[in-house]
Amino acid sequence: MSSILETYRAMHAKSKAFADKAARVFPSGVTHDARAFFPFPIYVDRADGPRKWDIDGNEYVDFIGGHGALLLGHNRPEVMDAARRAMERGTHFGSSHDLEVAWGQQVIDMVPCAERVRFTSSGTEATMMAMRLARAYTGRERVVKLEEHFHGWNDLLVGRTRADEPLPFSVGVPPSFYSTLTVVPSGDVKALHEALEPRDVAAVILEPTGAHWGTHPLDPSYLHEARRLTEETGALFIMDEVITGFRMAPGGAQERYGVTPDLTTLAKILAGGFPGGCVTGRADILDFIELRESDSEWNDRSRISHQGTFNANPVSAAAGLEALRIIAAGDECERADATAASIVRGINTMFREEGVPGSAWAVSSMWHLNLGYDAPMPVEVEWDAMDEPHGVVPDLMRPLRWALYNHGVDLMGNGGMVSSTHGDREVEDTVAAFRATVHDLRAEGYLV
Ligand SMILES: Cc1ncc(COP(=O)(O)O)c(C=O)c1O
C-alpha cells in the first residue's frame, strides 16, 4: 500500500511538472507565501461554486475561496456578467467613471462606520493608508497592534508579531520603523489600557475576530473595550475587516458586534473576486486626502497624497458592486455561516466517534481545527473554552494536507473559508474526507 505522500505524488504528476518549472521562475516556486507547499503545491485548472479542479483532473471542496474573497463562491453568474460587461467598455480609463461612484456608495450604504471611501488595489495598501491617515489626523506617531494580528505585508505593520519581542523585527525594514509600533497581547484589556495611557497613540488596529481570521479567537467584549479606551485617550480605532467585511454580516464584524470604529480597511469580498481594497470611515479623517481649491498650504503641508494606477479599476468596481448588492439583498452571509456550523458539527461528531484528539470550531463562515492534542470541543460552534486553541500540531500539518488533498479537500491554514455555495454535499464530502484522512494518518503513526 502506498504512503500518504506517495499517493499525493502519484495523483499530482502534472502539478509536479509545473512546480519544477516554477522553481526556476519564482522564489520557492510560488507567488504568495501561503501557497508554498512541500513537496510541491497543486496547480489549479478551473473552479466553480464551492469546488475546484487541478490540472491532473482531481476535484476539491475549496476552502481557500480566493484567500477569503469569494463569499459568493467561484464564478457567481451575476458577478461574472457584470465584470464581462465592464471589460467590454474598457479595462482602464485612467479617469473617473460611473461604476466607482456606485461601488463607493454601496460601501457607505452597507458599512456602519463608512462616511467616505478611498479605493486602493489591495488590503495591504488599505492598512498602509489607514496608518497614514491616523497619524495625519491625530498628529501622533505611535500605533498599537495586537500580537499575531495580520494586516498585510506593508513596512509599518509587518514583522515578528509577539508582544515579548522588544521590537517586531522584519528583515528589510529599518529598525527605526518599529520605534513607533507597540505590540500588545491580544485580548488583554489592561495591557491595551497601559499602552494608550500616555495619550501618544495615533491608532489601535486589530482583526475583529482575533488573529488570522479567528485562529486565535478574540472575545467580542474586547472590541467594546478597545472602542471605549481609544475614545478616552484620543486614539483612532481601526478595524481591519479585509477578511470579515461583507462576510460576518453585510456590514461586517462591526455590524455583527455593534461596535463602530473610526476607520475600517476592506478588500477581498469588496472587489467581487477581483483585486481591490479601500479605507473607509469618518469623513473628517478621510478628508485628509482632500485636495483643497486655493489652499496650497493645506495641499502642500497637511494633506496626504494618494495615487495608485489600479485604484477603483472598472472591472473590479463592476464585480465588487454586483457582489455587494447581492450580499446586501440576500442571506448569503447567514447561509455560509450555517454551512460552516454544519462542518464543525460534522467533524466534531466524527472525531468523537473515532476518538480523535482534536476539535473544530468556527466564527461566522470561517472554521478552524485543533488536531493532535486533547482539545476541548466547543459547546456550540464558536470557541468557548478558557484556553486558547493550539490548532494543528505542527508536525501533523503537512501529512494532514497531503491526505486531505488525496481525499478531495483544499484547506486554508488550519481550516477554511466557507461560501454561500457550499452546501450539504460539501459538508458530507468534507466530513468523509476527514474520516478517511484520520484513518490514513493513524495507519502511518502520525496520529494516535
Ligand atoms: C486581516 C487582513 N488584513 C490585510 C490583509 C492584506 O490584504 P491583501 O492580501 O489584499 O494585501 C489580509 C490578507 O490576507 C488580511 O487577512
Image: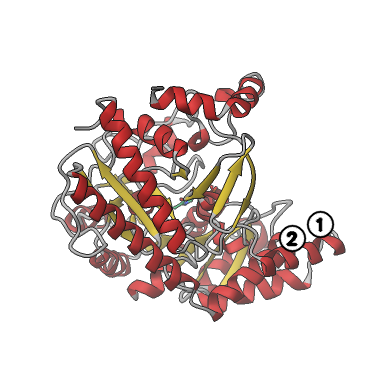
- x and y, in percent, of residue 159 in the image: 41, 36
- x and y, in percent, of residue 101 in the image: 70, 73
How packed mark 2 is, by other alpha carbons closer than 10 Å (few <14, some 14-19, many 20 or more), is many
For residue 409, the mark is none
- Give the distance between the C-alpha atoms of the residues marked 2 and 1, in whole angstroms: 6 Å
Q: Is residue 44 visible in this depiction of the protein?
A: yes
| 112 to the left or right of 258 | right
- x and y, in percent, of residue 110 in the image: 52, 77
Q: Nearer the viewer, residue 207 or 38?
A: 38
Identify residue type, mark 1. Thr
The answer to which quarter of the image holds residue 382 is bottom left
| 305 to the left or right of 94 | left
Q: Earlier in the sequence, mark 2 or mark 1?
A: 1
Identify residue type, mark 2. Val
Q: Dot 2 lies on which element?
A: helix
The residue labelled by disc 1 is: 91
| 224 to the left or right of 72 | left
